[in-house]
Amino acid sequence: MVNKVVEREDYFSAAIEILAEADHGGLKQSTLCRRLKVTTGSFYNYFGSWAGFKAELLQYWLDERTVNLAAAARDISDPARMLRALTDFACGLPHRAEAAIRSWSHSDPEVRRVQEAVDAQRYQVAYESVLGILGDETEADHIACLGLFILNGYQQMQPIRDVSYLRRAFDEVLSGLIPDRPPSAETAQ
C-alpha cells in the first residue's frame, strides 16, 4: 500500500463513491483505505473509530448536500429563481449514494436521524420557495411534499434512470406551479 496524504474530505468523497457503487453494506474501513491507498493508521488519525467516521460522514452529507445548498437557495430573493435553483441542486445530487443512505437509515437509528433532518430541511426550503410564489400555506405544503416524493422515488428506482427523467418530472410539476416558466435547458433539448 502506498502511503499518501489525504484530507478528511477525501475520506468522505470516497465513502460517497463507495455508497453509490456498493450500497451501505459495501462501506467498510478496509475498502475505504484501499480506495484512498492509505493505511488504517491514517484513518484512525482522523476519526479515532468507525463510529466517529460514520458520525462525521453523516454530518458532512447533511451539511454539503442539504444545509449549504438550502443556504445558497435562500440567498436568491426571487422565489421562482430559488425554486429553479433547488431543482438544479436536486438534479446534481449523488443519487445512488443518497439511495444507499436512505436504505441504511432503515436499519440504523443514527443514520435515520440524519435522514430525517435532511428530509425536513429539504422540505422546508422547498416550502419557503413555493410559499413565496403562491402565498398559500396548504398548497405550498402539498407541492413541497410532492417535490420530495419525486426526488426520493427517483432515487429508489432500480436501475436508476438518467437524471433527465428527474429534471423532466420536476419541470412538469413546476410548469403547473409557474405557468409562464419555460422548461429548463436540459428538458427543452
Image (cartoon, rainbow, N blue to C red):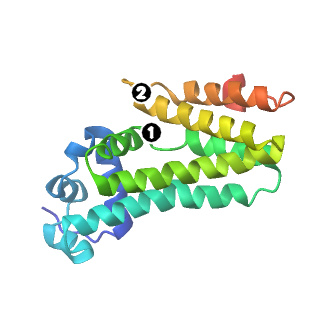
Above or below residue 145? Residue 105 is: below
Assess whether mark 1 and mark 2 are in contact (beta carbons under 8 angstroms): yes
Per the model, the C-alpha gap separating discs 2 and 1 is 8 Å
Above or below residue 183? Residue 7 is: below
Residue 70 x %, y %? 62, 56
Instruction: Answer with left or right where residue 155 lies relative to residue 41.
Output: right
- Where disc 2 sits, the SS reads loop
Q: Which mark is residue 160?
A: 2
Decide: few, some or many residues near mark 2? Use Cα within 10 Å; few <14, some 14-19, many ≥20: some
Instruction: Answer with left or right where residue 180 lies relative to residue 71.
Output: right
Instruction: Answer with left or right where residue 85 lies relative to residue 149.
Output: right
Q: Quadrant of the N terminus?
A: bottom left
Residue 88 x %, y %? 63, 42
Would you say residue 182 is visible in this rendering?
yes
The residue wearing badge 1 is 95
Above or below residue 24? Residue 179 is: above
Residue 177 lies in quadrant = top right
